[in-house]
């Protein structure tokens, strides 16, 4: 009770900024215009962003900050 729930919304994958997370059949990180799959072991190799809309896991305020140019520190597996 009282726990905050993640609120997602749909957005075009190509419009997501570096550092945003989204969900399809798995969880992804946007990194420099590419998508990296996320798993317990870290991030996988980069792949093209999917066409169309995806369910973003990053909230709207954080998307605005990332879109304004904030570059988050990423896990070493994303290098």
Image (spheres, rainbow, N blue to C red):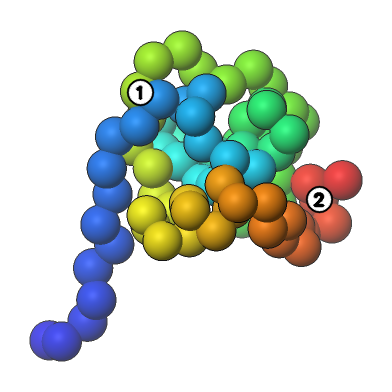
Q: Residues within 10 Å of mark 2 (few under 14, many from 20)?
A: few
Using the rendered image of the protein, determine whether residue 39 is visible from the camera's viewpoint: no
User: Is 40 left, or right, of 16 in this rendering?
Assistant: right
Distance from the alpha carbon under mark 2 to that under mark 1? 26 Å
User: Is 54 left, or right, of 16 in this rendering?
Assistant: left
Using the rendered image of the protein, determine whether residue 23 is visible from the camera's viewpoint: yes
- In the rendered image, the residue lying farthest to the top is 51
Quadrant showing the N terminus: bottom left
SS at mark 1? strand
Quadrant housing residue 9: top left
User: Is 9 left, or right, of 32 in this rendering?
Assistant: left
Mark 1 lies on residue: 53
SS at mark 2? helix
Quadrant housing residue 7: bottom left
Decide which of 46, 61 is in the foreground and name it: 61
Decide which of 41, 62 is in the foreground and name it: 62
Q: Going from the N terminus, do you reach mark 2 or mark 1 first?
A: 1
- In the rendered image, the residue lying farthest to the left is 1
| Percent coordinates x, y for residue 76 in the rendering | 84, 56
Mark 2 lies on residue: 77
Q: Residue at x 45, y 41 (%)?
A: 22
- In the rendered image, the residue lying farthest to the bottom is 2
| Percent coordinates x, y for residue 20 in the rendering | 54, 47
- In the rendered image, the residue lying farthest to the front is 68
């Amino acid at each position: 009770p009282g726990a905050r729930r993640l609120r997602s919304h749909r957005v075009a994958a190509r419009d997501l900024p570096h550092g945003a997370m989204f969900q399809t059949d798995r969880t992804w990180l946007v990194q420099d215009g590419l998508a990296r799959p996320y798993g317990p072991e870290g991030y996988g190799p980069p792949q093209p962003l999917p066409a169309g809309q995806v369910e973003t896991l990053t909230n709207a305020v954080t998307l605005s900050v990332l879109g304004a140019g904030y570059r988050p520190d990423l896990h070493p597996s994303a290098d």
